[in-house]
């Protein structure tokens, strides 16, 4: 594979679409409640998964991609993922959470055009140690699937039974 930018463009779009589709499989009420059986579905509500992915991408992934265009490495503490920051985010309308995710994902996809001629294989200092750009963008792709998997499992196995008891 020699056109990483094109390949990642497709993957980032597709994984974002899957995450968004999955969360809309849950009712508005279900999106904000912790699921039953945390041993299978985790303790977070689906909306927190969406917010978590968006904030990770805004604070760490996107700035890390920009390193290949001369920007500094983001600070390790740039990402504020805590119960307190989630409580503030949870007060926003759900559509704002969706929009925030779609916006930051769109910025990453657009940035791929600028990175098309970058060296995708030579490691450089990143938040994850000495890693190539290929790994930095792969991490975003993997992280989306990690959380989309949980959200989709909630929608598949819990949609019709959860909160109807």
Image (spheres, rainbow, N blue to C red):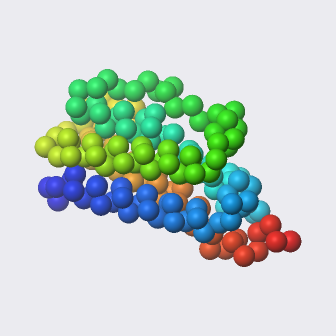
Residue 103 image-quadrant placement = top left
**Quadrant of the image occupied by residue 39:** bottom right
The residue lying at 55 percent from left, 65 percent from top is: 22
- Check the image and name the residue furthest to the right: 165
Q: Quadrant of residue 14?
A: bottom left
Residue 27: x %, y % from top left: 68, 65
The reply, left or right, for residue 24 in relation to residue 63 is right
Quadrant of image for the N terminus: bottom left
Which residue is drawn at the image coordinates 64% and 34% (left, top)?
85
Q: Where is residue 146 in the image (x, y as percent from the top left)?
A: 51, 57
Q: Residue at x 68, y 51 (%)?
A: 44
Which quadrant does the C terminus fall into?
Answer: bottom right
Q: Horizontal and vertical percent for residue 59?
A: 46, 34
Which residue is nearer to you in this view: 99 or 164? Answer: 99
Report whether residue 153 is seen: no
Residue nearest the viewer, comparing 9 with 120: 9
Q: In the visual, does 107 lie left or right of 161?
A: left
- Examine the rendered structure and indicate whether residue 155 appears above or below residue 33: below
Q: Is residue 79 above or below residue 148?
A: above
List x then y, in percent, for residue 24: 58, 64
Residue 19 in sight from this viewpoint: yes
The relative height of residue 25 versus residue 122 in the rendered view (above or below) is below
Q: In this view, does 130 lie to the left or right of 39?
A: left
Residue at 42% x, 43% y: name it: 104
């Amino acid at each position: 594979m020699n056109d990483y930018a094109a390949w990642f463009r497709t993957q980032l779009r597709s994984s974002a679409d899957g995450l968004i589709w999955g969360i809309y499989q849950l009712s508005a009420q279900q999106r904000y409640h912790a699921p039953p059986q945390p041993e299978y579905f985790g303790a977070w509500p689906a909306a927190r998964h969406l917010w978590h992915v968006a904030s990770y991408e805004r604070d760490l992934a996107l700035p890390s991609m920009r390193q290949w265009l001369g920007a500094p490495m983001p600070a390790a503490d740039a990402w504020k993922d805590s119960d307190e920051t989630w409580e503030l985010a949870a007060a926003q309308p759900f559509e704002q959470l969706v929009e925030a995710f779609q916006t930051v994902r769109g910025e990453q996809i657009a940035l791929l055009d600028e990175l098309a001629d970058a060296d995708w294989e030579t490691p450089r200092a990143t938040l994850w140690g000495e890693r190539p750009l290929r790994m930095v963008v792969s991490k975003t792709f993997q992280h989306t699937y990690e959380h989309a998997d949980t959200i989709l499992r909630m929608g598949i196995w819990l949609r019709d039974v959860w909160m109807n008891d």
